Image (cartoon, rainbow, N blue to C red):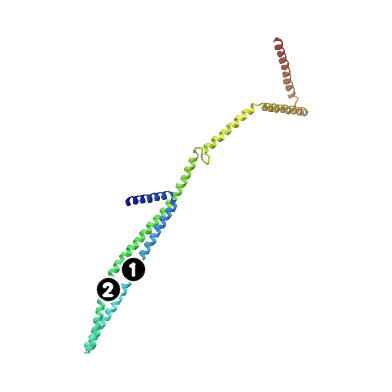
Amino acid sequence: MWKSIKKWWNYMGAKVSSSFNERADPKIQLEQAITEAQEQHRRLKEQAANVIANQKQNEMRLNSALEELEKLNRNANQAVLMAEEAGSSGDAAKMAEFTTAAEAFANQLIAKEREIDNLKSMSLQATAASDKAKSAVQQNSRLLQEKLAEKQHLLSQLDQAKMQEQVNTAMSSLSEEVGQDVPSLKEVQEKIESRYAKAMGASELQDMSVESKMLEVEQASMHSEAQARLSEIRSKLGIGEAAAPAAASEAGSEATSEPVAGTEAQGEGSAS
């Protein structure tokens, strides 16, 4: 039972994580990753600073111990010399005192030398740890700079991907079927062509109507009146004599043709 619950819990966790990753904004996730890398670098620098500080403290303690050792050496030498002088002068009491002091300095020298040996060992270890810490900080700093450069590259690539998605959406909208919120270019083209065809059909019907013929007759009559007025104006100006006989001959031929047509009509009536 417990295994089943654990499997179900792991499955739900993986499902939620997968759904979150699909819906999450890559730009925000990238910013989070860079922030986490910067935070890790900051913690590493703090740890390295502590290691380097420990190494510096060991160095200062070692230098201080070496100074004390040198001072103890001088004091021990001085005590031995003073004990020797007291012995030469026959002062046994002072000789014993100075000898005791020299022994005390000697014991301190032995303890200080042991302390210095320990400090040297610790200093070597601290120096090695400090060098490793500095190297780790430099290496992590280089990796962080590479991540920052990669961030700019990924952001540029993300912007290009978004632009390409918009282009793909625009191209796909040109061939979308009817039923979308915004009509496609093909639908608009079909609508315009249908409207144009209907307008042309209505125009053809209008040309075949009686009203259009009547309008044509009126326009012809207006044209004849305009020509007559122009002839009158030319006659008044004296520039219509040459044109007048030609017009008269054309009118005469038309007049002679009309009686012939009338005669033919009468002959057909009598024959019938």
Q: Quadrant of the C terminus?
A: top right
Return the residue nearer the eye: 70 or 116: 116
Who comes first in sequence, dot 1 or dot 2?
Answer: 1
User: Which residue is the extreme one toward the right?
Assistant: 236
In contact (CB < 8 Å): disc 1 and disc 2: no
The circle on residue 162 is: none
Q: Quadrant of residue 82?
A: bottom left
Can residue 89 be spotted in the picture? Answer: no
Query: Residue drawn at (37%, 58%), measured in percent from left and top?
Result: 142
Secondary element under disc 2, as helix, strand or loop, is helix
The image quadrant of residue 74 is bottom left
Give the answer, above or below, for where 14 lies relative to 224.
Answer: below
Q: Which residue is mark 2?
A: 115
Q: Residue at x 32, y 74 (%)?
A: 64
**Disc 2 residue type?**
Glu
Give how far across and how far down residue 179 sits, in percent.
Answer: 51, 38
Q: Residue at x 46, y 45 (%)?
A: 165
Q: Position of residue 62 (x, y in %)?
A: 30, 72
Could you say which disc has been placed on residue 54 in the image? 1
Q: Residue furthest bottom?
A: 90
The image shows residue 212 at horizontal and vertical percentages of: 67, 28
Q: Residue at x 24, y 78 (%)?
A: 107
Residue 27 at x, y percent in the picture: 44, 52
Which residue is outermost to the front?
1
Seen in the image, is 141 located left or right of residue 237? left
Rendered view: 257 above or below 57:
above
Q: Disc 1 versus disc 2: distance between alpha carbons?
A: 17 Å
